[in-house]
């Protein structure tokens, strides 16, 4: 028999010549991002031709090096795809009131369709007040109470970029989601909870596991889809998955050698999933898709406001 069909998302399985085992197909976040970003670029150009390109304002407070890299990548992606973007960087001592004033000015700026305040913020700033200050139609992070309510009730709206990107990656496998058992590990407002709601909206049967779940493996071994969003490496290991499942790794950690890794023990889990399984790599998986879906949200906000 030949090797398995590559999935529509551009994945590939890997034949291990050493012991003859065939491992799960990769869901390539870079390839899928390229496809989606090409369409974003075309739609951004159409808006620009009508007078105003989509505009994103990114605010960074403080000097967290990881956040600085993330915001630079977001701004760079805007420039590469014809979106207007501004980056406002402030010292960690910025008073909350000043930040709220800047957000009010951006709310009123017709060249700006999306506002993103990079998290985490310094301790003296209340993230909930900051999120609430962003005009609902410019909330391209999908973090506001309105956006969360729209997601919960199934209304159209702006979806948080990371879980939105995870859904696109699951869809790219070509597998039908309705009736599948999805297990989400993690219950954050930014990933775990919206991920569970998006899967529910797609008619999956959803289990949400978290730090107080006594036996994670009992759940994950039954799952057709596992989304790991904990922020701790080796949370999902080979003995915890069902062959043929789809595994999405949202984690962004460092191993002992300082190398980037996710929440999933990648090589071992990829092998345990077998040729019918799918898995996202770190890096090159969810990370690029998060930025891609931010561009999609900014475009959507601009099209709605146009
Ligand atoms: N920090 C880490 N991820 C994100 C994100 O998606 N949006 C914002 N605003 N901050 C973040």
Image: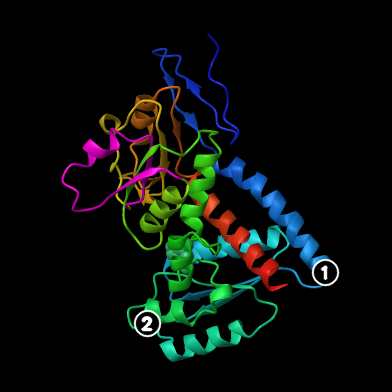
Q: Which residue is the site of mark 1? A: 50
Question: On the picture, is 84 further left or further right than 135?
Answer: right
**Image coloring type:** rainbow
User: What residue does disc 2 label?
Assistant: 125
Decide which of 190, 250 is in the foreground and name it.
190
**Horizontal side of residue 202 vs 234, given as left or right:** right
Mark 2 residue's CB less than 8 Å from ligand 1: no
Using the image as rendered, state which of residue 161 and residue 206 is in the foreground. 206
Determine whether label 1 and label 2 are within 8 Å by CB: no
Regarding mark 2 in the picture, which secondary structure is present there? loop
Q: Is residue 53 left or right of residue 195?
A: right
Quick check: is 208 in the magenta stretch?
A: yes
User: Does residue 207 sit above or below 115 in this rendering?
Assistant: above
First along the sequence among labels 1 and 2: 1
Instruction: Based on the picture, tell me whether residue 304 belongs to the magenta stretch.
Output: no
Using a 10 Å C-alpha cutoff, classify the residue at mark 2 as few (fewer than 14 neighbours), some (14 to 19) or many (20 or more).
some
Query: Residue at the right extreme?
Result: 49
Residue 223 horizontal/vertical position (percent): 33, 36
* Residue at mark 1 to residue at mark 2: CA–CA distance: 38 Å
Q: Residue at x 47, y 39 (%)?
A: 177
Region in magenta: 203-230
């Amino acid at each position: 028999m030949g090797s398995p069909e590559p999935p529509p998302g551009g994945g590939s399985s890997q034949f291990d010549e050493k012991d003859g085992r065939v491992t799960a197909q990769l869901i390539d976040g870079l390839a899928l991002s390229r496809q989606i970003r090409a369409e974003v670029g075309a739609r951004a150009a159409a808006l620009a031709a009508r007078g105003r390109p989509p505009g994103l304002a990114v605010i960074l407070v403080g000097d967290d090096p990881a956040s600085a890299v993330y915001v630079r990548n977001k701004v760079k992606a805007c420039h590469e795809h014809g979106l207007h973007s501004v980056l406002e960087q402030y010292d960690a001592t910025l008073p909350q009131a000043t930040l709220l004033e800047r957000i009010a000015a951006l709310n009123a700026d017709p060249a700006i369709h999306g506002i993103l305040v990079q998290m985490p913020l310094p301790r003296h700033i209340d993230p909930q007040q900051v999120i609430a200050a962003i005009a609902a139609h410019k909330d391209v992070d999908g973090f506001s109470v309105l956006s969360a309510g729209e997601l919960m009730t199934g209304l159209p709206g702006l979806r948080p970029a990371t879980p939105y990107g995870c859904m696109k990656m699951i869809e790219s496998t070509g597998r039908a989601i309705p009736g599948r058992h999805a297990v989400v590990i993690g219950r954050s407002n930014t990933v775990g909870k919206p991920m569970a709601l998006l899967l529910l909206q797609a008619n999956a049967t959803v289990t949400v596991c978290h730090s107080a779940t006594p036996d994670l493996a009992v759940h994950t071994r039954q799952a057709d889809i596992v989304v790991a969003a904990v922020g701790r490496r080796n949370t999902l290991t080979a003995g915890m998955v069902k062959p043929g499942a789809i595994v999405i790794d949202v984690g962004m950690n460092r191993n002992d050698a300082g190398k980037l890794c996710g929440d999933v023990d990648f090589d071992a889990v990829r092998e345990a999933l077998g040729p019918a399984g799918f898995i996202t790599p770190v890096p090159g998986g969810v990370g690029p898709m998060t930025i891609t879906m931010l561009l999609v949200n900014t475009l959507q906000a601009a099209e709605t406001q146009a």
